[in-house]
Amino acid sequence: MSSKHIKQVFFIAIMFLLLITVSLLALSVGEINFTPNEILKIFKNQTGIEYMIIHNIRLPRIILGIAVGGALSLSGVLLQGVYRNPLVEPYTLGISGGASLGVAITIIFNLSFVFGVYMLPVSGFIGAVATTFLVYILAVRKNYYNINRMLLIGVMISFMSSSTMMFLMSTTTAENLNSIIFWIMGSLDEPNKILVKAVFYISLVGLATSYLMANPLNALRLGESKAKHLGVNTTFIIRAIFILASILTGVSVSVAGVIGFVGLIIPHLMRLIIGSDFRLLLISSFLGGGIFILISDIIARTIIAPNELPIGVITGMIGGIVFIIVMSRSKIKI
Amino acid sequence: MDNKNFLKIEKLKSGYTDKFIIDNISFDISKGSFTGIIGPNGSGKTTLFKTITGELSLVKGSIYLNNNNILKMQPKQKAQKIAIVTQTADAVDISVEDYVLMGRYPYKKKFQLFDTAEDLELAHKFMKLTGVLRFKDKLMTELSGGEQQLVAIAKALAQEPELLLLDEPTSHLDISHQMQVLNLIQKLNEEYNLTVLMIIHDLNLAAEFCDFIIMLDQGKIYVKGTPEEVLTYKNIEEVFNAIVITQENRITKKPSILLVSDKTYKQI
């Protein structure tokens, strides 16, 4: 192993440790603060209100945070790799717009009876998948597609679904409006443990799957045509990445709502730190996304305690400020 | 092995989505030859290359490499046999070594994330051969255009191809780098018996380096043969619509082409 490789392994190890540290911090802070010793004791005894708080409220929230942050950031890095465009993020392709529209329709037309408690996530996911599918069939012609065309169509579909949303919101009752806005703002507070587990496992499987595409993504850094010359089946890879990113984004949006900015800035920050080799970039973006979401959530829960800010507010503010500072100081071009 | 019909192209028609650019082309080249493809802009040179590398969807006819139909080959399998160097290396912020290692992509298994010792050894061997080993830790973006092309050739060699395609590899380079690149290609052709097919604009360089030349015009082969047979003032005037004087160079004994302006032409 060369010194370069040692450095890279070291970096991933640090990210991993950081994620664990932040998770522990997230377990201990909140309305009631616990020391690490107290947490250990609580886990040993497995009873009492403290155990309820830590095990039933904070732990699922941390797991969901890692899963959603990881999934969004991973799908951001995948899409930026395929489109070779630094401004692309998971929501650019209309995925969040579609999910929000799906949820809004469900709330307004009171469709909850179909799937019960799962109705909002399910309708969010259906909305997300339907939009990506629409973008895909509109962009592909005779098995030939232009990547920029796909982006433009995605942006247009995004605008159209948000206009439809606005129309629906302006004509509905105040109560419905409240539920929609609450959902859109995004939150890691998900009482249903099955959903939390599902998102977690799907994001891990997504991470593993993305490694099948690490080499082709590296080749795509030289452009579609040069990747083809190296034997990359670009049509297949671009399609596979599009589907993978849509599933990852769709799943996280449908459970946690629209949490912005993670998918855009974490891949950029990681690229600034460790370079553009996708073999490193995929895992570090995943871990970085988790860390970022957990930190943002800790701030969102504590800054105006006992009240809570929507996590999207924090990711946007903190993320944006950090990002601008880093970008303006670094010499690396996007 | 069939040395004579190493690359055999038969009744090839190809183009983009709805229009044929290459119009019924047939030719074959022998193993170890250095073939030049010349022709005016839009005559189908690059389209021909894109057909061979499999970048076009509209293709009729057949292309055989060593008796294997390459139009039916899997992309990775094909990339182990054919490598291409284009006009520019499309530099990104990637180290020279990593860029050359990308040439090993066709040999990688799906979940193989790390380069093997053999990959690294080959990459170093070809970087040494092309004279870029000293830059190995530099970023591609830090190199000059000529150096980038040498790295691109090292990457192509790392694919261990049987056929090397070059699409105007020197068109953006000054004469010193032009000669450096072309001399290297000639060396690879002669010492390693690598079959070379090169699109080239400069007719004098084509005459100097190629042992066989195919002249394309409007998607068809206008003439093919040795440089002496192809590079006549009549052929050039007819196809390129330019006035030239051709003569045998007294020293190199190869055809030499002199371009003549309209003004000078009127005076003589």
Image (spheres, rainbow, N blue to C red):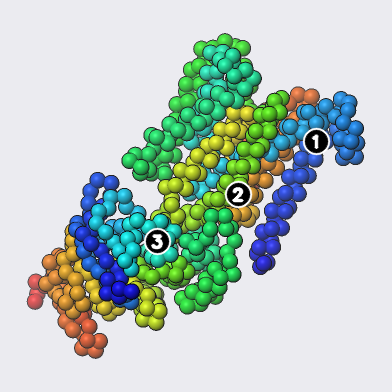
A2 and B2: which is toward the camera? B2
The answer to whether marks 2 and 3 mark residues whose Cβ atoms lie closer than 8 Å is no
Quadrant of the image containing the N terminus of chain B: bottom left
**Which residue sits at x=59%, y=16%?**
A112
Query: Residue drawn at (56%, 42%), measured in percent from left and top?
Result: A76
Q: Give the residue drawn at x 20%, y 68%.
A: B215
User: Is the residue A189 above or below the residue A85 in the image?
Assistant: above
The answer to whether marks 2 and 3 sit on the same chain is: no
Give coordinates of residue A67: x percent, y percent.
66, 38
The residue that label 2 is drawn on is A282
Q: Which residue is mark 1?
A: A27
Q: Residue furthest bottom?
A: B251
Quadrant location of the C terminus of chain B in the rendered image: bottom left
Residue A12 in the figure: left or right of residue B124: right
- Distance from disc 2 to disc 3, alpha carbons, whole Å, reads 28 Å
Disc 3 and disc 1: Cα gap in Å? 54 Å
Q: Is residue A226 visible?
A: no
Q: Amino acid at mark 2?
A: Leu
Judging by the rendered image, the residue that carries numbered circle 3 is B78
Q: Is residue B37 left or right of residue A307?
A: left
Q: What's the CA distance linking mark 2 and mark 1?
A: 26 Å
Badge 2 sits on which subunit?
A: A
Q: Is residue A315 above or below residue B114?
A: above
User: Who's the residue at 72% across and 34% down the image?
Assistant: A297
The quadrant in which residue B81 appears is bottom left
Numbered-mark total: 3
Q: Residues within 10 Å of mark 1 (few under 14, many from 20)?
A: many
Percent position of residue A312, x then y: 64, 31
